[in-house]
Amino acid sequence: MKSMLVILLSAMLVDNFVLSKFMGICPFLGVSKKFDSAVGMGAAVTFVMACATLVTYPIYTLILVPLELEYLKTVAFILIIALFVQIVEMFLKKAVPPLYKTLGVFLPLITTNCAVLGVTILNIDSNYNLGQSIVNALGAGLGFTLALVIFSGVRQRVNAADTPEMFKGVPATLIAASIVSVSFMGFSGMFS
Amino acid sequence: MFTTYIVPALVFAAIGLLAGVLLTVCSKVFEVKTDERIDKINEALPQINCGSCGYSGCTAYAEAVVRHGVATNLCNPGGKETSAKIAELLGVAAMETVPKIAVVRCSGDCNARSADKFEFDGIQSCKAAKRFYNGHSACAYGCLGYGDCVTVCAHDAVSIVDGVAKIDRSKCSGCGLCAKACPNQLIVVHDITNHVDVLCSSQDIGKNTRAACKNGCIGCKKCEKVCEFGAITVENNLAHIDYSKCTSCGKCAEGCPTHAIQSCDGVITVKPAAQKPTAPAAAKPETKTEK
């Protein structure tokens, strides 16, 4: 139980996918303009990460390894991820149309989000068992959500601030992102 | 052979099949019922996504018509037929449409305009020419003549004649794509029933306008005085016609010493100003014919 908690927290804070591993930067910058869409995107990614792990782990251990097809794991995993992204998309279109509209192109882009593929592959590479893998995926998803939510707040403040003309927009956003990233470096070494 | 090629193919086919089945089931479960009228109206629209209806594209307009009951006559390129079709699909009475048409507010062709300030060798587009010292032409407000409007026109209605854009009124649908493309904002889209327009956009003082172009509006305010309906005002050395008051009588065009105000469609034949006795064929004085 204790090891599970360590995995969850380290995936969330120490090895935060966005701010420490620099995976999934595209939605991090694209959807963090508003708090609501940041939460929605985070939830969608967390769901896809957890479900994809739940399916990719058995597929890897029960199908790909016995048949010696480990080299095809990337392709297989992308297939599974695409499946879940489609399901999430349909669900959101039905249940929360405004969120579906705000997320726009970034929703189908979860398919090619390297954070999602990264989680599934890192689970395999770290020799986690199924339970640990799912906890790791949940931690990664929550960390992604956390990063997006924190950054959406930062971004609203930065946009409201009186930045010099040349830093307005993307430059100020990227500088703010780097500072948020630096702040997460404070967690490093916490659980090692 | 079998294990290297066939097995992976089979495994992936199986995974793909399972995913496909799952997705089909999900698409049935999460099916969103869309109003089929939206699709039908969308099909009836011209699909050039010009945005002149005020919505981001044809699909957005179709949605607005069905969901929010927006007027059916907002599509300029579609005109009467589209309005009637939309009304029929919705089962409401067709709304009247006034066709719109684009007008180029510059008549400074190469016969009228003074020599260029310099030769422009850069990218041959109006936007690029405009960025380079406001263009090569003697008049900074006039048509640059590289045909950015010609490129965007979906109806092949714009051409460059003597260095100035000309609209073929039989082909123009009033979508306003050319108006958006013009870096000098020379092209306006207005109701086809407006027969007179100021065919100049120069806000320079009269002396400079005159030096640059023979056909320019010099802001002399003659039209202001001659208009019986108070429809014309001169602001920033340029005449403006208020079409809510204009009756297309053509008096202003007669009075204009530089012929900057003209009949933009030839519907009104304007008697030439007294000091210039020309235009023999169109000598029917002040006849106003309704289309």
Image (cartoon, grey):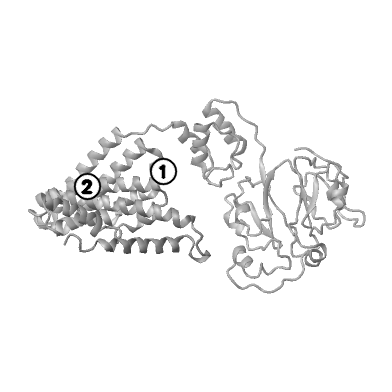
x and y, in percent, of residue B278 in the image: 88, 55
Label 2: few (<14), some or many (≥20) within 10 Å? many
In percent of width and height, residue B35 lies at 43, 31
Which percent across, then down, holds residue B200?
A: 75, 56
Inspect the image, locate mark 2, and give the three-letter code of the amino acid beneath it.
Answer: Ala
Rendered position, A47 above or below B186: above
> Which residue has dot 1 on it?
A101
Instruction: Report which residue position mark 2 lands on.
Output: A50
Residue in the image at 72% along x and 71% along y: B116
User: Does the image show residue B282?
Assistant: no
Residue B153 position, x and y percent, is: 59, 52
Q: CA distance from mark 2 to mark 1?
A: 24 Å
For residue B73, side relative to residue B162 (left or right):
left
Task: Tell me if residue B274 can be seen.
Answer: yes
Question: In the image, what residue type sits under mark 1?
Answer: Lys
Would you say B226 lies left or right of A42 here?
right
Q: Nearer the viewer, residue B39 or A92?
A: A92
The residue most toward the left is A66
Quadrant of the snapshot with the N terminus of chain B: bottom left
In this rendering, the answer to whether B184 lies above or below A91 is below
In this picture, residue B161 sits left or right of residue A25:
right
Helix, strand or loop status at disc 1? helix
User: Between A22 and B156, which is closer to the camera in this rendering?
Assistant: A22
Which residue sits at x=62%, y=67%? B129
